[in-house]
Image (cartoon, rainbow, N blue to C red):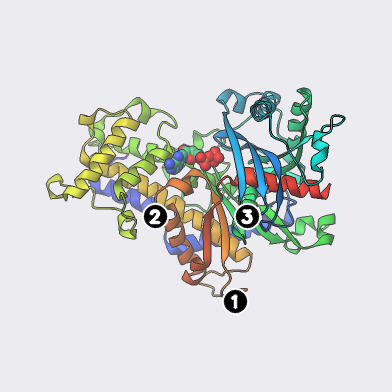
Amino acid sequence: ATQHEDPQAVFDSLEQQFSLHEEGLVALTKTFLEEFKVGLTNYNQPMAMIPSFVQGVPDGTETGTFLALDLGGTNLRVCEVVLNGDKTFNLVQQKYRVSEALKTGEASVLFNYLAESVDAFLTSRATTEYVSPSSPVESTHSQAKVEPVNLGMTFSFPVEQTALDSGKILTWTKGFSAKNAIGNDVVKLLQDAFDRKHMNVKCVALVNDTVGALLSRAYTGGGCVAGCIFGTGTNGAYIEQVSNIPKLANSAVAKKGGQMVINTEWGAFNNSRSHLPTTAFDNAVDRLSINPKFQAFEKFISGLYLGELSRHILVALVDATPKSLLFSGKSTAHLNKHYGVDTSFMSAVEEAWVGKDDSADAFALPPFSVLEFQKDKLSPKVVEKLENIRQHIVKDLEFDLEDVSLRDAAIVRWVCALVARRAALLSGVAIATVLIQQGSASLVSENKPVKSNNETFGIGVDGSLVEFYPNFNGILRESLRMLVGEDVEKRVEIGLAKDGSGVGAALCALMATKLA
Ligand code: ADP
């Protein structure tokens, strides 16, 4: 609990702890660039900079029908993707829940479940034919030999990839910890599970969701230089020159040259814990997480943690002495429960606050001095917004209405905005690092010459945070402007790679069958 005679000092201190200024962001970007270089040079680094073995990006003319399996976050998805060859696709998908028992039990049980889910999906789609370019249409009708169904797997955990269809699991993240998986080949684990069930499905490609976002955005939208995820976790992939990847120097790939999509695993930035402005709340979230001291950057940014971080702050305000600063010292089972506050709650609160107003002012922080808060001085519009937030608190955190004042509602919004703003600014650091690494931008403060003056930079993004959190993009862009300047920021085209995992896996499966 926080002890202060002057309550305003508590809020001021919180604001100060969570604020990030230009110099801080610049310093972080420089460190990020250094960690990129270390990861491109050496194996087994926290920022793993994993070669994806994807050496070209699609242009929208690709065709074929593929299965895709996506494991990496809150849901498991199985989909059928039809690439139409005109930048469009059709996708049918089914989501399956991954229970805590599956996430933390034996890997073979988890992979059996993946195979069963694909089997269930295929049964429900029994009439569809799967046509890959290497298997002419007639052969799927042949009675003698039925071509296997080609499947691309999106597996969004750190994997040391050795080919398009092979890679060893390095670590689990995002709440997974299945036993006897680390060090094993993901494709083999999955294929063995298919084979155990005598399924005619072949896993031909392994792809990270970030790489998938990049590929799918390249397919649907033309050029794309990076794919980023801001969902349960955060991570990014970008196009690198093979000549900039010293750790591949002795491989066949290096002789071929050209480009390679790199999965950065940037969620692990700052695992050494010396760069990010870490608060006591961050330490608590980390300490109580399933992977203390790992995925440090992710814990500042992603959906899995932002709600929990806000919860810790709210609880500290409830517990503040000598006088509680929130909910008159009351709490609920939800508020006291580990991960009891979801990031979608923060989103809903912010949405209630800004309403339809998407001006920068609407998102400003703080909206007003929390302690000068006087109900009779508020405009009817503000009262209405706070009433709305109050309803969310009552509903989502299960408070009694009379225990939540409008002032409490204002404080809750302020806390959510504090946490989300820091996350979005840091997300900008990661994207700025990619643009600088690619030679497309330089830090404003360094003003180095860059490649071109009018090129646009497509960035495919996916994840509930970036899709739904009000103004997450706006604040991320604010960060980009500070770091690489407005001229570059204006040319960054951030687009949702909707269904990026599925489409990306399909595109990868296509590349794999062409190479085979
Ligand atoms: P995944 O990354 O697992 O594929 P999502 O992109 O849907 O899936 O991300 C899920 C995460 O996003 C969860 O941690 C959840 O707390 C958070 N989330 C869900 N809905 C919202 C929302 N409306 N706004 C912000 N975050 C959300």
Rendered view: 206 above or below 26:
above
- For disc 1, the marked residue is 449
Quarter where residue 129 is shown: top right
Q: Residues within 10 Å of mark 2 (few under 14, many from 20)?
A: some
Say if 237 sits above or below 345 in the image. Answer: below
**Image quarter in which the N terminus is found:** top left
Residue type indicated by callout 2: Ser
Spatial separation of the CA atoms under disc 3 and disc 1: 34 Å
* Image marks 3 and 2: residues in contact by CB distance under 8 Å: no
Q: Amino acid at mark 1?
A: Pro
Look at 13% across and 50% down and name the residue there: 377
Secondary element under disc 1, as helix, strand or loop, is loop
Q: Nearer the viewer, mark 3 or mark 1?
A: 3
User: Which numbered disc, 1 or 2, marks the residue that appears first in the sequence?
Assistant: 2
Rounded to the nearest angstrom, the CA distance separating label 1 from label 2 is 31 Å
Establish if 471 lies above or below 93. below
Q: Residue at x 30, y 51 (%)?
A: 12
> The residue under label 3 is which amino acid type?
Lys
Name the residue beneath numbered marker 2: 19
Q: Is residue 46 visible?
A: no
The residue labelled by disc 3 is 87
Crowdedness near tag 1: few (<14), some (14–19) or many (≥20) residues, C-alpha within 10 Å: few
* Percent position of residue 286, x then y: 50, 38
Percent from the top left, x then y, of residue 283? 47, 41
